[in-house]
Amino acid sequence: QETALSLGPICPGWMLAGFKKNVSHQEIERVLSEAEVWFQTSNEQAGVEWLPIDGITNFLFNDLGYEDVDEFEDAIQGSFHEFLGAFPHIETRLVGERWMYRVLPLQPGPPRKLCLTVTSSGQLLETTLLQAPDADLDIPGLGFTIKSDQKRHIDSLYNHLATARLNLEQHSGEEEIAEMARSIGKLLDVDEPFELIILDPSGLSDMQPMDGVRIEALEQEAAGGLPPVEEEAEADG
């Protein structure tokens, strides 16, 4: 039996820095989320500390529409135990001939704001944001906040904004909402610099690269915005 090194609770700032896969891809985020939920449910209901990887592998490649395990592992760029091992909050170990995994708890940090001045479309495409379940994305120049929907989202800044624009377009019953959708669309072209602020009460959000990101204490003031909707944008990048 080979025992994995225990890292203890994972602290904010480790998450995206440890990712070795293209986590901006929605499929990768879905696979990761399913693995986390599978473990958390088993741990809460049955008290298991390690789960066999092969069980969730078979579930995932069927659920996601892959013909077989080989096609599934091509999509995640390697074996499933290698995929899971790329994330700093997941441990894997080999027991006999079976790979096992467990998900480590995340340790909340102080409430904070992640502030970034966006200067180009390339920066939007190349900067990945892990938006914690309780974090809001504020656009001060528009007086608009993309409110948390109590789910983690990992994607490029471009896709975070494109998703908000699409959601507004699909639920715009008023000219004010339609105008906000157009304003967010203009931001994607970055004709001039603008500010983005992640309001991060749990301190569990992260951005990579961190170049130019300013970290400030978060006052517990209310941030306005419109309620989230579930549709996701299909944006290139």
Image (cartoon, rainbow, N blue to C red):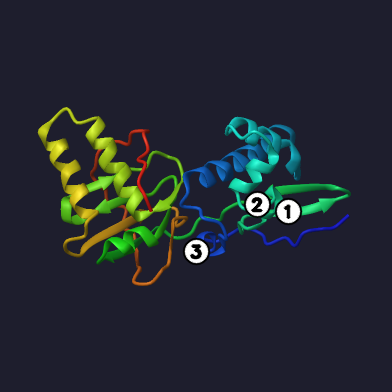
Q: Residue at x 42, y 58 (%)?
A: 128
Q: Quadrant of residue 86?
A: bottom right
Dots 2, 1 in contact, CB < 8 A: yes
Q: Position of residue 1 (x, y in %)?
A: 88, 54
Quarter of the image for residue 140 reads bottom left
Question: How far is mark 2 from mark 1, CA to CA?
Answer: 7 Å
| Earlier residue among tags 2 and 3 | 3
Whichever of labels 2 and 1 marks the residue nearer the N terminus, that label is 2
Q: Residue at x 68, y 48 (%)?
A: 80
Where is 195 relative to 40, above or below? below
Amino acid on which the number 1 mark rests in the picture = Thr
Reading the image, the residue beneath label 1 is 92
Q: Earlier in the sequence, mark 3 or mark 1?
A: 3
The residue that mark 3 highlights is 13
Task: Identify the residue under disc 2.
Answer: 84
Query: Residue 24: percent from the left, percent from the top?
Result: 46, 52
Q: Nearer the viewer, mark 3 or mark 1?
A: 1
User: SS at mark 2?
Assistant: helix
Residue farthest to the top, as pictured: 173
For residue 174, which numbered disc appears in the image?
none
Question: In this orientation, which residue lies closer to the viewer: 41 or 96?
Answer: 96
